[in-house]
Image (tube, rainbow, N blue to C red):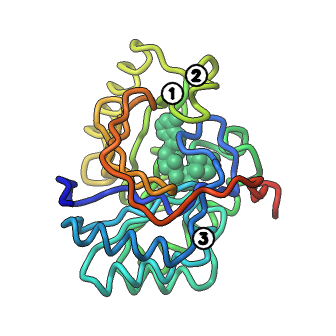
Amino acid sequence: MKLHLPAMVCFRVTRYCNARCGFCLAPPDGAHPPAPVLMQRLDWLAGQGVRTIHFCGGEPTIHPALPELLAHVQASGGGSRLTTNGIALPARLLPALRAAHTRVKLSLHGDRAHHDAVVGREAFDPATRHLRALLAAGIPTGIQTTVVAGGEWVLDWMADYCLAEGVPQWCVLPFIPRGSGYRTQGEYGLTSAQRTRLRERVRHLRHTLRGRLDIRWLDFSTQPLPVVEADGRVVLERASESLDTLLYTIPGYTVPARRVPDYASRR
Ligand SMILES: C[S@@+](CC[C@H](N)C(=O)[O-])C[C@H]1O[C@@H](n2cnc3c(N)ncnc32)[C@H](O)[C@@H]1O
Ligand code: SF4
């Protein structure tokens, strides 16, 4: 069966995670497919004409097969990207990212206190250490920031941080009420006036910092996102689950009915 998939899809390697962000649009749900299942999905996507795999999750770096998955995409002529919370950077991953020419986005949501509060654990120090390691290794790495209600100040702080650290690209994601975010929208939800103000501020920063920092506004409530879920569903994801379109289910994997391991409390 041939689907009309875009050239790039978000590929959820796992739904396990070593953090517990209160806003998480894809929180742990037990899905953590083994490597052969993920390889088979990558082959299926290549057969559908998908050229670039954007590895995400859950937290993709905690899947032990991530280096092999990157190499597999590269060997079949595809391109890869990775979005990570940056808490873990296993030794095998850095050379694998370099060999596959992967572009990385590392999620950082503000200063140490704010970042650790929204991520639900101490995460700022390892994430910023790994950001520096990625940049020093010559891996094209940008930052991605989710902005929640009351977090407007984060924009100026993050812009200064990116400039100080020599980060070339910064993507701003306004909060959407998916996953855990459905439950926390009372605390984190943005009114349309707040969203508009944020967008205006991002426009202003983009204009002011042109040539020094490439700033993007990625609002998932206006741009549906093609996603291969960790359970094998291929979904066009929108602002909330009720608006999603299920395109297909890749067979071959059943989510086990067992407790999700608590990676977030491991140090
Ligand atoms: C679902 S995470 C998966 C990758 C990785 N675990 C991470 O956090 O970078 C991908 C991106 O979505 C963002 N995100 C998660 N929940 C969100 C929400 N409710 N609204 C907007 N962005 C969200 C995260 O901040 C992250 O940059
Ligand atoms: S790091 Fe946060 S946003 Fe990313 S998957 Fe884990 S809990 Fe969700």
Instruction: State the residue position of label 3.
Output: 63
For marks 3 and 1 on the same chain, the one whose residue lies earlier in the sequence: 3
For marks 1 and 2 on the same chain, the one whose residue lies earlier in the sequence: 1
Amino acid at pointer 2: Gln
Q: Is residue 161 visible?
A: no
Judge: label 2 CB < 8 Å from ligand 1.
no
Q: Position of residue 165 (x, y in %)?
A: 50, 60
Classify mark 1: helix, strand or loop.
Answer: loop
Q: Which mark is residue 185?
A: 2
Q: Position of residue 207 (x, y in %)?
A: 25, 38
| In contact (CB < 8 Å): disc 1 and disc 2 | yes
Calculate the distance from the C-alpha at mark 3 to the C-alpha at mark 2: 29 Å
Residue visible at 30% across and 46% down? Answer: 247
Q: From the viewer's perspective, is the residue at label 3 or at label 2 nearer?
A: 3
Amino acid at pointer 3: His
Q: Position of residue 130 (x, y in %)?
A: 60, 68
Calculate the distance from the C-alpha at mark 1 to the C-alpha at mark 2: 6 Å
Judge: label 1 CB < 8 Å from ligand 1.
yes
